[in-house]
Image: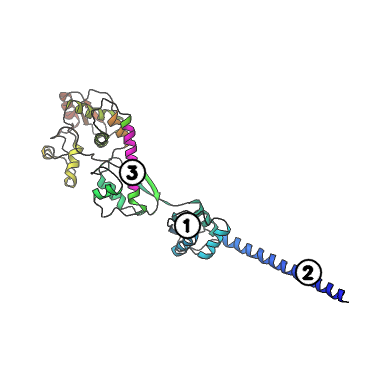
C-alpha cells in the first residue's frame, strides 16, 4: 500500500514539474515575444525629427538617458537592457544623431552601434579672406563655438600655427564634421590641409621661380587666385607676376591694394588708392606684399610654383572674365584702350 501511495505522489510531482516547465516556457515565450514586439514597435517622438548628442566616453545607460531626455519616447532602462541582450551595449559610438518618426528601439540601438551620426558642413571658398572664414565658422549652427572672443593671434596659437598673420593659411574646401564639433578643431583641419598642399607643391616647384620660401609661394598664389577670371588664364597670369619678380618690376596688382584698404574699400578703386602707400600696395612697393591676401586653391598654388613660360609682363581684363596679355607697355596700353577705355589693367 505504501508503494502505491508513493507512486501516486511521484506521478503527481512529475505532472507538477511538467506543468511548471510548460508555464515557464510559455512565460519565456511571452517574454521573448513582448521583447521582440517592443524592440520593433515605432517609438513616439516629441517632434517629427529629434536630435541628440552622445558625449565621448558615455556608456549605454548614459546614452539612453540622453535619448529619453531629448524627446524620444523610450524608457532608458528598457533601452539599455535591450542593447545588452543584443550584445550592442559596449559598441555604441559618440557623436550627434537624429531620428525621425517611425524609428524603433532596435533601429535606434543599431544606429548607435554603427556610428550613423549626422554631420555638419563648413564650406570655405577660394579667394575668401580670413574675415570671411571667421564669419562662416562662427555662424555655423552645428559647431561648438570655441573661437568666439579669441583674437587672430590667440586663434593661431590654439591651433598650433607658427605664423603670426592668419590670412591665406587655410585650405578652401568643404569640411564635414560631427555636429557639435569644436570650431577650432575644424579650423585646424583646414590649416593642416593647406600645410600639406603647400609642402607638396613647393617640392614640385620650378627651381627658376624667384620665391624664397613656401610662405612667399602662398602669397603669390593668393594674388593669382584673386586675379584669375578664367581657369585657362591662370598659368599666364602667374607667368606675368613671375616675369615681373625676376626683373624687379612692381607687381601693380589691384587686389593687393584693395586688401590693404580693408573695410574702408567701398567697391570702387580710385587713383588715390593706387598712389597711397601701405604695406600691401604693390603699385608703390616692389616685391610681394607681407602676407597673402586671400585663400588660394590648389590650382593657384600649382600655378604660382609652376607658371607657364611666357614673355608677358602685362594683362588686362577683357570684360568677359578672360584676360588680354601683352609683352610691352605699348601693346598693353592699346589693350587698355580697347577693353577699358577709362583706364585700368596692369
Q: Mark 1 points at which residue?
A: 99
Nearer the observer: mark 1 or 3; the answer is 3
Q: In this view, does 307 lie to the left or right of 37?
A: left
> Relative to 266, does residue 18 appear above or below in the rendering?
below
Q: Which mark is residue 142?
A: none
**Sequence-wise first label, 2 or 1:** 2
**Residue 92 coordinates in the image, percent (x, y):** 49, 54
**Quadrant assignment for the N terminus:** bottom right
Q: Residues within 10 Å of mark 1 (few under 14, many from 20)?
A: many
Q: Mark 3 points at which residue?
A: 190
Q: Nearer the viewer, residue 166 or 143?
A: 166
Q: Residue at x 55, y 62 (%)?
A: 81
Earlier residue among tags 1 and 3:
1
- Tell me, yes or no, whether the two marked residues, 1 and 3, touch with CB atoms within 8 Å: no
Magenta segment boundaries in residue numbering: 186-201
Residue position marked by numbered label 2 in the rendering: 14
Q: Is mark 2 on a helix, strand or loop?
A: helix
Q: Label 1 to label 3, Cα distance in Å?
A: 30 Å
Q: Can residue 271 be seen in this view?
A: yes
Residue at 20%, 41% (x, y): give it.
Answer: 259
Is residue 74 in view?
no
Q: On the picture, is 289 further left or further right than 79? A: left
Amino acid at each position: 500500500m505504501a508503494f502505491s501511495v508513493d507512486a501516486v505522489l511521484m506521478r503527481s510531482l512529475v505532472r507538477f514539474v511538467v506543468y511548471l516547465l510548460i508555464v515557464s516556457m510559455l512565460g519565456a515565450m511571452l517574454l521573448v515575444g513582448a521583447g521582440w514586439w517592443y524592440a520593433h514597435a515605432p517609438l513616439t517622438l516629441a517632434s517629427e525629427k529629434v536630435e541628440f548628442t552622445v558625449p565621448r566616453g558615455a556608456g549605454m545607460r548614459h546614452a539612453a538617458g540622453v535619448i529619453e531626455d531629448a524627446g524620444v519616447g523610450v524608457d532608458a532602462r528598457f533601452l539599455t537592457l535591450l542593447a545588452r541582450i543584443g550584445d550592442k551595449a559596449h559598441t555604441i559610438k559618440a557623436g550627434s544623431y537624429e531620428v525621425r518618426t517611425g524609428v524603433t528601439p532596435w533601429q535606434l540601438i543599431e544606429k548607435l552601434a554603427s556610428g550613423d551620426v549626422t554631420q555638419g558642413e563648413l564650406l570655405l571658398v577660394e579667394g575668401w579672406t580670413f574675415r570671411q572664414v571667421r564669419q562662416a565658422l562662427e555662424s555655423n549652427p552645428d559647431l561648438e563655438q570655441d573661437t568666439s572672443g579669441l583674437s587672430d593671434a590667440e586663434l593661431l596659437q590654439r591651433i598650433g600655427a607658427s605664423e603670426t598673420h592668419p590670412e591665406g593659411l587655410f585650405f578652401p574646401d568643404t569640411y564635414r564634421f560631427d555636429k557639435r564639433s569644436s570650431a577650432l578643431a575644424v579650423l585646424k583641419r583646414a590649416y593642416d590641409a593647406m600645410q600639406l598642399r603647400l609642402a607638396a607643391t613647393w617640392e614640385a616647384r620650378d627651381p627658376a621661380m624667384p620665391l624664397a620660401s613656401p610662405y612667399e609661394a602662398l602669397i603669390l598664389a593668393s594674388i593669382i587666385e584673386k586675379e584669375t577670371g578664367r581657369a585657362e588664364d591662370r598659368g599666364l597670369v602667374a607667368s606675368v607676376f613671375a616675369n615681373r619678380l625676376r626683373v624687379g618690376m612692381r607687381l601693380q596688382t589691384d587686389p593687393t591694394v584693395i586688401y590693404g584698404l580693408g573695410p574702408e574699400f567701398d567697391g570702387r578703386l580710385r587713383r588715390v588708392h593706387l598712389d597711397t602707400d601701405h604695406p600691401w600696395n604693390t603699385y608703390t612697393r616692389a616685391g610681394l606684399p607681407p602676407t597673402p591676401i586671400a585663400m588660394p586653391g590648389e590650382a593657384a598654388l600649382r600655378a604660382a610654383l609652376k607658371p607657364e613660360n611666357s614673355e608677358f609682363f602685362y594683362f588686362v581684363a577683357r570684360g568677359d572674365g578672360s584676360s588680354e596679355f601683352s609683352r610691352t607697355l605699348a601693346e598693353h596700353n592699346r589693350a587698355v584702350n580697347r577693353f577699358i577705355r577709362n583706364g585700368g589693367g596692369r
